[in-house]
Amino acid sequence: MFSSSKIKSVDFYRKIPRDLTEASLSGAGLSIIAALAMMFLFGMELNDYLTVSTTTSIVVDNSSDGDFLRIDFNISFPALSCEFASVDVSDVLGTNRLNITKTIRKFSIDPDLRPTGAEFHSGPLPHYIKHGDEVDEEINEGSVALNSASFDKLSHQYQILVVNFYAPWCYWSTRLKPSWEKAAKIIKQRYDPEVDGRILLAKVDCTEEVDLCRRNHIQGYPSIRIFRKGSDVRETHGHHEHESYYGDRDTDTLVKTMEDLVDSIPQEDQKIALEDKSNVTKRPAPLSGGCRIEGYVRVKKVPGNLIISARSGSHSFDASKMNMSHVISHLSFGKTVSPQVLNDVKRLIPYLGRSHDKLNGRSFINHRDLDANVTIEHYLQVVKTEVVTTKSSHDHRIIEEYEYTAHSSLAQSVYIPVAKFHFELSPMQVLVTEDSKSFSHFLTNVCAIIGGVFTVAGILDSIFHNTIRLMKKVEIGKNY
């Protein structure tokens, strides 16, 4: 058995009787300073322990979201009609998707970007529109040529006014002309405009009646519009509730369509039927000349293009009158990050999220009206940023975000103007890793602070005390 004296011999902290110790004013002051130093250094160490530090590195992209990337956008075109607005995607691997509609929504807007109605449903356009074979026949004028004055007069006079807005230089307008004139002549014979008064077929040359075509938001030729008496508000020359015809353009189909329209209007009381039960290939015409396009597309993670333009397989467009000016309300890559999550991550990396939606709120307006065929291009370089924190020895992914740089330009082209977004993804990604700090390391540092300050203070006190004693001895020796 160990005796108590032997156990006491291993005591590291032997006590000195209080009677053998001596307190001094300098020692008290040094003790206060040492205590304050301990508290200050402890606070610094605690702040460092609680502060999150990160390490940034560049690694090869190992995305967990597969080979496809989502692009969300909300873009307003003040001068592009929803009737022909098309969203296309292409890439260097040969992918070429035209007129995407499944994940896209369109809303007619006025020049001030205000919506003018509910969502515009363009619906699927037929891949092939049948035309007549009367090209070589002698064309007898059957439809009535309109100008601005006669258009307003006749649209109030007839229950149904069907107008062919055309351009003489347009190939499709030339294909339609024989069938249209022949159909107009047949309808005029069956439904005498002077006696019946229910329907009239007319035409407008958009190269001569520019204001009238602009008033009706005509952007593609030929455009066949069906105007119903009393269904248009012409005081503002901007809001119309008429319909567009997208069916076949041969004589028989046109005549059958017009007869179906007339059948919906009883001749006796000359009242417009509340419900049109005719099987006519038509849809509501756009309420204004602008369009807001919103939605998303999924693209492969290779260089590619998101293109918004006017597109139709059976219409022609005057490139000199196409204006692809637009305002980008939103454009981002990858999954949508909630503002709350983004704010939490900014606690770790304050600079994160600054380029997530770099083009938001930007306007790209073509003020050079004299310059035709102006295409607006955006070159986007996309880089992925991933934030990872370590918890319980396992990597925990906080956020995956795509940021991009953007360079834009206006350039003239020999083709129909478009709004093109060329994107290129970097094969590398920015990896931000949270550096973990162990609690044992924090305790070790705290102990080092306390012990170190205590020891240094003791050494200073000893030096100070011995110096004073030495000075006193020297002074006493001089007196003797």
Image (cartoon, rainbow, N blue to C red):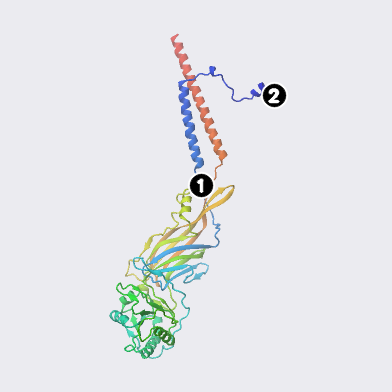
The residue identified by callout 2 is 2
> Which of the two labelled residues, at mark 2 and mark 1, occupies the earlier sequence position?
2
Quarter of the picture containing the C terminus is top left
**In screen coordinates, is 80 left or right of 52?**
left
At label 1, counting other C-alpha atoms closer than 10 Å, the crowd grade (few under 14, some 14-19, many 20 or more) is: some
Q: Residue furthest front?
A: 269
Query: Residue at the top extreme?
Result: 480
Distance (Cα) linking label 2 and label 1:
54 Å
Which secondary structure, mark 1?
A: strand
**Amino acid type of the residue tagged 1 in the rendering:** Thr
Q: Closer to the camera: disc 2 or disc 1?
A: 2
Q: Which residue is mark 1?
A: 54
Instruction: Tell me if residue 204 comes above or below residue 387 in the rendering.
Output: below
For residue 184, above or below residue 299: below
Q: Is residue 31 visible?
A: yes
Name the foreground residue: 329 vs 410. 329
The kind of secondary structure element at disc 2 is loop
